[in-house]
Image (cartoon, grey):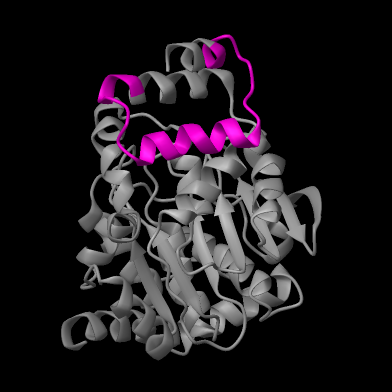
Amino acid sequence: MVKMLQRIMDKEGMDSSEAEALMRSIMGGEFSDAEIAGILVALKMKGESVEEISAFAKVMRENSVRIAPKVEGALVDTCGTGGDSLGTFNISTAAAFIACGAGIPIAKHGNKAVSGKSGSADVLEELGGRMLSPPQVEACIGEVGFGFMFAPFFHPAMKNVMPVRGALGVRTVFNILGPLTNPAGAQAQVLGVFEPSLLPKMAQVLDSLGVGHALVVHSGGMDELGLGESEVAELKNGNVESYSLDSAEFGFLPAKIPACSSASESAEIVRGVLEGKAGPARDVCVLNAAAAIYVGGGASGIGEGVGIAENSIDSGSALGKLEEFARFGRDG
């Protein structure tokens, strides 16, 4: 352990087998909290390689509870790394319901807040949803077209890491790994990252994990597509292309995105968007939903996806999916 930690601190990389062995030891509870904290901080300082992240994600997937929802088309996840520290409301959660209302099956993977004020689990509970067991989530996706996989229910081995993550209170490699370990094996993703240097790296990791189409996105410190300039690494059929995207191309001018101080405040903004309230919150959610619709095969590009996303809100379909999800949680 000491030798491995020293190597990481000396910024020496691990090969796949070494990284897999390290993650298996962490998942197996072989390290103390202090040792895990040391590893996480050292990795953060070194910067994780594509090979290391892919190996870590592979082991986490092996240790997860898997589900196989029956849906037509590609399952899509809209998930960010978190850790952007900007305090924005839960854009990806709202975008997921908008995309679902447009016919895109969503298998969203997330947790309660670690480094932010409102995680996707927090806001979904405020919106009337419940955290469901793996079999219930599988059924919910099949029936509603939307399901939320609460990470602690699907990654039981993470119990050895969560206290350390909470105590550190800063982003770690596990912020990166969360979106890479979808228990439903989502074939398409919109994945937001907290810094632009991660864009091509995460796209390459998704490719190594078998994802067919993904947009890895970042905008001005935010792990979403923003109102203004965004940076994108698009993975499609094994190829990664990097480019900039201007929201003005789709009719959305630069604007300040609402921040929130709590899950209840975030839920209020999300519900307002789904109910059709106009403004920057709606615009940024439509843009991110359009990206999800695109990678899910429901549009030929983000531009076409914007119109489809707008209709999902205006027709009441997006709000209807939230209500169906909440009802499923109550009634099963």
* Magenta stretch, main secondary structure class: helix
- In the foreground, 242 or 53: 53
Q: In the rendered picture of this protein, how many numbered marks are placed on residues?
A: 0
Residue 287, can we see it?
Answer: yes
Residue drawn at (72%, 42%) of the image: 200
Work out whether 247 lies above or below 141.
Answer: above
Work out whether 142 lies above or below 190.
Answer: below
Q: Which residues are magenta?
A: 7-35
Percent from the top left, x then y, of residue 94? 42, 67
Residue 300 lies in the magenta stretch = no
Q: Quadrant of the N terminus?
A: top left
Left or right placement of residue 89 versus residue 253 in this view: left
Query: Residue 332 lies in what quarter of the image?
Result: bottom left
Percent from the top left, x then y, of residue 264? 21, 57
Percent from the top left, x then y, of residue 134? 32, 72
- Residue, far left: 330
Residue drawn at (68%, 40%) of the image: 201
Percent from the top left, x then y, of residue 58? 55, 50
Left or right placement of residue 306 versus residue 158 in this view: right
- In the foreground, 31 or 122: 31
- In the foreground, 317 or 246: 317
Query: Residue 252 lies in what quarter of the image?
Result: bottom right
Residue drawn at (25%, 85%) of the image: 328
Work out whether 277 lies above or below 47.
Answer: below
Residue 223, can we see it?
Answer: no
- In the foreground, 236 or 134: 134
Residue drawn at (23%, 85%) of the image: 327
Left or right placement of residue 270 versus residue 256 in this view: left
